[in-house]
Image (cartoon, grey):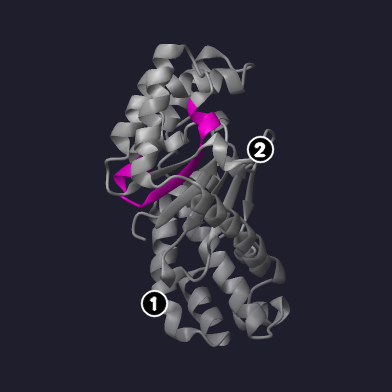
Amino acid sequence: MEAASPTVLKRWLAAELRQRRVAAGVTREQAAAQVRGSVQNIGHIENGRSLPGPLELERLLEFYGAGDRAEFWLGVRERAKRGKDWWAPFDGSLVPADRGLFLGLESSATAIEGWDAQLVPDLLQTPEYALAAIQGGTPGRTLPEVAGLVELRMARQRVVLGGRAPVRRVVAESALRWQVGDREVLRSQLAHLVDVVRRPEVEVRVLPFAAGVAPTGSFDVLSFPEEVGDRTAVHVDTEVADLHFEEPERVRRYRGALERLRDRALGPEESVDYIRQVAAGS
């Protein structure tokens, strides 16, 4: 929680105030009157565009019947105000707003789970594999842009894996066999995958071709600290934008899909053996 992204902390605080107000049956007009502010200001706070002042935050939570949570959310507010997102040093063109939100959510998660249908998971890629994947996936990028994206991905790995949050992936056999770069790049990537799953917080389960048809789209399911409430999020990376779902019904459907994939996949030890077999034949 202490290391959570300021972008995400602000989002969580905004969601908390919005949900508390609605649950208390209070209108934005009534909330604005309570803090002697404007309806527009309440809207900006609830949309995460601005942070409430400390007194505003205390008064609003008290008005919504959640005064006992004021100390916790004041701490969140302070960290959101003073913190700095880990990707801030990178060129802004490499991190549009939707990607920044995902990077913040991912680095703030207490568990990172997901399904990878076509490529080895970003968090487990070698620099050479990442370079080939980015060049192949976005052929219009300049060489400096590609180099920046590879550097960003490697920094992302250091931040997320260094945080020791569990990373659990179900990976399609096709992702292990897809020719990304030359054969040596793929062999090195598979060897790295075998090595990295030795870390206690990393688990990879392979879904072999023999398991039958599987979803074509990859996705992530991110869990967060209990103290911020039930804020599980789903991330889907599309061709045009990063999509984020937090509605309970959508999260439930994605989590159910992931559980079904995990049930059909090989176990962790069997998966390591399978990766070795694929590497030997690549």
Q: Amino acid at mark 2?
A: Thr
Q: Which quadrant holds the C terminus?
A: top left
Q: Position of residue 110 (x, y in %)?
A: 39, 57
Residue linked to disc 2 = 238
The answer to whether mark 2 and mark 1 are in CB contact below 8 A is no
Q: Does the magenta segment cover residue 223? A: no
The one nearer the camera, 161 or 78, is: 161
Q: Nearer the viewer, residue 36 or 2?
A: 2
Look at the numbered disc 1 and give the secondary structure of its residue: helix
Q: Position of residue 37 (x, y in %)?
A: 64, 74
Residue drawn at (64%, 62%), measured in percent from left and top?
Answer: 44
CA neighbours of label 1 inside 10 A, class few (<14), some (14 to 19), many (20+): few
Q: Which residues are magenta?
A: 159-176
Q: Earlier in the sequence, mark 2 or mark 1?
A: 1
Task: Tell me the quarter of the picture where residue 178 sits.
Answer: top right
Q: Secondary structure at mark 2?
A: loop
Q: Residue 196 placed where, x, y %?
A: 31, 36
| Label 2 CA crowd tier, 10 Å (few <14, some 14–19, many 20+) | few
Residue 51 appears in the figure = no
- Of all residues, the one furthest to the front in this rendering is 210
Question: Image height check: is 35 above or below 65?
Answer: above
Q: Which residue is mark 1?
A: 71
C-alpha span from label 2 to label 1: 39 Å
Amino acid type, residue under disc 1 in the picture: Glu
